[in-house]
Amino acid sequence: MNIVLLGAPGAGKGTQGQKLVEEYGIAHISTGDLLRAAVKAQSELGKKAKEYMDAGQLVPDQLVIDLVKERLAQPDAQKGFMLDGFPRNIAQAETLDGELKGMGVELDAALLVDVPFDVIVERLSSRRTCRACGYTAPAGTDTCPRCGGEMYQRDDDKPETIAKRLDTYQNQTQPLIDYYKGHGILKAVDGNRAVDEVYVDVKKVLGA
């Protein structure tokens, strides 16, 4: 099962992805995590990435692809993988397709967790995060149920910031939906329901 995970910020795709990883033992490949790990390990790719990050520049697509390829070569990814946070645009998707083809690997599905934007704004803006451990809970929770820390609203969970994030998503990532639809591998589920209900549909569309 080789999947690309798609969905707007706050759509709940991370939650669904985690369930798939736990149940099927596929590798969860988050490009953000890969970059941080490479920088921390001071690998050759990590050193290159750090130069761009320190300069406040975006890490070039090819460097990210090289990190992904390196990760896909690891044993746990042979059972299957889920790409989270990459590709973000058509150019990256085309490059990824070419590299996977060269490795003799094919994508089985692009899984879209679809939630209306107004629901996402409401969902994220009513979210509170623990300053100490990062636990998230609905508004009205002043003390973290996990560690007793202070709950607060992150800047990127404020309605005006969410609107900007959704604009960026729509401009850059939304075209990917059409791209994968054109390749016949787009699988969409309605994410505006209880987590377990959504997961039942996820497994159904993936034929899992």
Image (cartoon, helix red, strand yellow):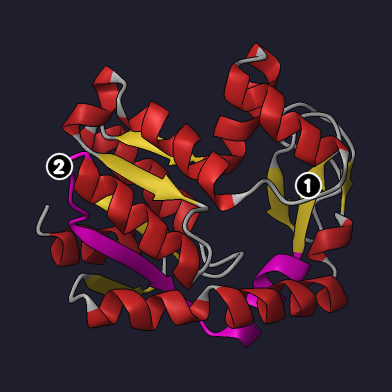
Circle 1: residue type: Thr
* Magenta residue check for 38: no
- The percent position of residue 104, horizontal first and vertical second, equals 15, 42
* Residue 36, above or below 9: above
The disc, 2 or 1, on the residue closer to the chain's N-terminal end is 2
The disc placed on residue 104 is 2
Residue situated in front as seen by the camera: 139 or 178: 178
Amino acid type shown at disc 2: Gly
Category of crowding for the residue at label 1, using alpha-carbon neighbours closer than 10 angstroms: few (below 14), some (14–19), many (at least 20): many
Residue 144 horizontal/vertical position (percent): 78, 37
Query: Tag 1, which secondary structure?
Result: strand
Give residue 159's quadrant in the image.
Answer: bottom right
Whether residue 192 is visible, yes or no, is no
Asked whether disc 2 touches disc 1, contact meaning CB atoms under 8 Å apart, the reply is: no
Seen from this angle, which residue lies furthest left? 207
Q: Is residue 76 left or right of residue 142?
A: left
Q: Which residue is mark 1?
A: 129
What range of the chain is rendered magenta?
103-126
In this view of the protein, which residue sits in the foreground, 100 or 127? 100
Which residue appears at 31% of the width and 47% of the height?
A: 99
Residue displayed at 40% across by 69% down: 113
Left or right of 174 on screen, residue 77: left
| Residue for point 24% across, 36% down | 23
